[in-house]
Amino acid sequence: MKNLILFAIVVITISLSCTSHVKETPKMSGAYFMLSQTINDGKKDTKYTDLKQLKIYTDSMMMYAQVNPSDSASGFGVGFYTSDTGTVIENDIYRASDSIINPPASYKLEITTNPRGYVQVIPDISVDSQKIKLTEEYQSVGKDQKSPLTAYGKKQVVTW
């Protein structure tokens, strides 16, 4: 009997410790403002805070718009996304610089949510033919409300 109780305690302890490390599927719906961008070239981290970017996610679609105040360059894109345990896969279907992208450009983002918003990491992305690790920190902005973006492809009345 003593061994049975000890065995039960060990099993419960192991199961509780395993469940505390399980990553959840990110819930991305909302609007987010980018606070910083960190680029790691394999040797050092370089952090930027001057690029202004806004991302908006609905239940299945996403869009972004950005401007760099230092050189007035701007861009935007739209697409769809899927999320899974700890990751989001964004599929750009249109970007300001490329027009329609066929097939869509895909980016696998490692997502860590926090009370403020989230951090996304693309561990291996090519920029100017160089592989880098890109980390971006976003802050949630706006309020939860129904919007025409959520109604995309659905017949429903939207109120503001």
Image (spheres, grey):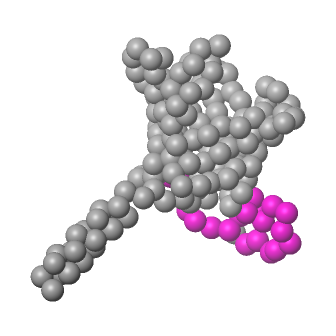
Q: Find residue 89 and report its horizontal and vertical position in percent.
A: 65, 45
Asked whether, in this view, residue 40 is left or right of residue 67, the answer is: left
Residue drawn at x 75%, y 59% is 149
Query: What span is colored magenta in the figure?
Result: 138-159
Asked whether, in this view, residue 6 is left or right of residue 104, the answer is: left
Residue 148 vs 70, above or below: the answer is below
Q: Nearest the camera: 46 or 143?
A: 46
Residue drawn at x 63%, y 29% is 67
Residue drawn at x 62%, y 54% is 83
Residue 60 vs 99, above or below: the answer is below
Q: Find residue 115 and report its horizontal and vertical position in percent.
A: 40, 56
Residue 47 vs 82, above or below: the answer is above
Residue drawn at x 80%, y 38% is 104
The quarter of the picture where the C terminus appears is bottom right
Secondary structure character of the magenta stretch overall? loop
The quarter of the picture where the N terminus appears is bottom left
Quarter of the image where one finds residue 131:
top right
Q: Find residue 125 and report its horizontal and vertical position in percent.
A: 60, 26
> Is residue 154 covered in magenta?
yes
Label tally: 0
Residue 31 vs 38, above or below: the answer is below
Quarter of the image where one finds residue 96:
top right
